[in-house]
Image: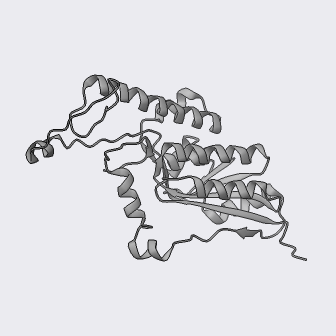
Amino acid sequence: MDFNDHGKLAVVEVRGVITDSEDVVRQLSGYRQDDKILGIILRIDSPGGAVAPSQEIYSEILKIRASSKPVYASMGNMAASGGYYIASATDRIFANPGSVTGSIGVIMAFSNIEGLIDKIGVRPEVIKSGEFKDAGSPTRAMTEKERKYLQHVVDDVHSQFIDAVAESRDLPLNEVTKIADGRIFTGRQALDLKLVDELGGLELVIEQLAIRAGIEGKPKIIQEEEKVSLTDFLLGSWSPTRSLQSVTSPAFTPSLQFLWNLN
């Protein structure tokens, strides 16, 4: 008989830019339904990423909480913007004093290549069904009306971010709004602002979660190994830098991002 069989904690890692939720949600869902897993740690080292995947991970964490299985967040070097968004859904958040977190905000970046098009002598022609169908087109300057329209979209998603943090962290909405201007905080600053609960690394999180889960002695840690195909390795498509550039660089098809952007 395996005496560790009923003393297991699972660790799910979120590393790099959040571009997709499928793998993280699959792991979280599996551990939620596994009665042998008594608690889950979300280990985050991410500047955030796309809005919808972040929201899908957030929603799955709420399901874990609703199941009465404890789920804690452990911040590594960074858990900013979307990284903080998903952390806020957990029962308890741990950060290192120097972890970078916060950045409660939304960004939507566009490219304008109108000058380049003029130089090469190309003249785009657009047929559209509505006034705003090509808002943000890279082939022309954005009108003031389009800018206001897109700003409303960004503002709505921003308010969703603020609402989620206020509700999950049990903080007054006006207090979250005051600091939801995109600024980052150290883990120590975030503790003072009640954005995190305690300072400490992964080992402390494991220790505290084991106590919360009623595990006596050292828990058995379950964690999937990251799978990188030979093709991805040779092409470098797994690289965090490449992934970051693909999301932070203004694109022809912009998307809403919960992302701490240094560009």
Relative to 165, 18 lies left or right = left
Q: Exactly how many numbered labels are in the figure?
A: 0
Left or right of 70 on screen, residue 56: left
Q: In this view of the protein, can residue 74 be seen by the observer?
A: no
Q: Which residue is drawn at 14% across and 39% down?
A: 123
Q: In this view, does 66 lie above or below 25?
A: above
Pinpoint residue 187: horizontal percent, then vertical percent: 52, 52
| Picture quarter with the N terminus | bottom right
Which image quarter: residue 3?
bottom right
Where does residue 95 sit, x and y in percent of width and height? 57, 55
Closest to the observer, 216 or 83: 83
The residue closer to the viewer here, 92 or 259, is: 259
- Residue drawn at the location 71% of the way across and 68% of the way down: 222
Would residue 183 appear left or right of 94 to someone viewing this image?
A: left
Q: Which colour scheme is used?
A: one colour
Q: Could you tell me residue 176's position as x and y percent?
A: 53, 33
Instruction: Report the residue at 46% width, 49% height from top.
Output: 49
Answer with the quarter of the image where residue 31 lies.
Answer: bottom right
Residue at 21% in and 33% down: 141
Quick one: which residue is furthest to the right in this view? 1
Say whether residue 5 is left or right of residue 97. right
Q: Can residue 241 be seen in this view?
A: yes
Give the image location of residue 198, x and y in percent: 63, 51
- Does 223 sit above or below residue 178? below
